[in-house]
Amino acid sequence: MIIKKIQYSQSRETYTGIGLKQWNKCGFEAEIEPGENPLEQLDELKKIATKFHENPTQVTIDEALQGVLPEVQVDKTPKEARIEVLIEEIEKEMVLRKPDGTGGLLSWEKLANSNPSLKPAFDKRLKELS
């Protein structure tokens, strides 16, 4: 048998600062180079995951990996831009509910009621479709 890739993931239940439970999960995959021992490589992946879980609020993934992976830049979308996208999606809705009872404008109601930035767009589209 030839093992070309190995994978390891680890999940732990933790409590947030306000007492809520959450699951912290991290996983890693590695390619085995010729001559490398898959069990040793799996052990390395376990060590990385364990280091992350020892204190996930203070250890970043970058610190846990310590240069194992190349740095990747990810552009984050500002909150205002995300709100604009959601407003555009609300404005695109053509029906209150789809024939199967799912989707449509009414599927946005709970989110719109909980977000003052979305409420005007939802109310306007609701008035147009009613």
Image (cartoon, rainbow, N blue to C red):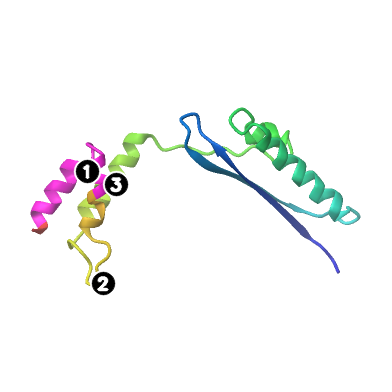
The amino acid marked with disc number 2 is Asp
Which of labels 3 and 1 is toward the front?
1
Q: Provide residue 67's location: percent of width, then percent of height.
A: 73, 35
Q: Provide residue 94's location: percent of width, then percent of height.
A: 18, 61
Residue behind mark 2? 100
Q: Provide residue 73's location: percent of width, then percent of height.
A: 56, 37
Q: Name the residue at 88% across, 53% down.
A: 37
Q: Residue furthest right?
A: 35
| Quarter of the C terminus within the rendering | bottom left
The amino acid marked with disc number 3 is Leu
| Mark toward the start of the polypeptide (3 vs 2) | 3
Q: Name the residue at 22% across, 50% down.
A: 109
Q: Name the residue at 13% across, 53% down.
A: 126
Mark 2: secondary structure: loop
| Mark toward the start of the polypeptide (1 vs 2) | 2
Image mark for residue 11: none
Residue behind mark 3? 86
Mark 1: secondary structure: helix
| Mark 1 nearby-residue class (10 Å; few <14, some 14–19, many ≥20) | some
Does residue 126 appear left or right of residue 67 in this picture?
Answer: left
Mark 3: secondary structure: helix
Q: CA distance from mark 1 to mark 2?
A: 24 Å
Give the residues in magenta: 110-128
| Mark 3 nearby-residue class (10 Å; few <14, some 14–19, many ≥20) | some
Q: Name the residue at 50% across, 40% down.
A: 21
The amino acid marked with disc number 1 is Asn
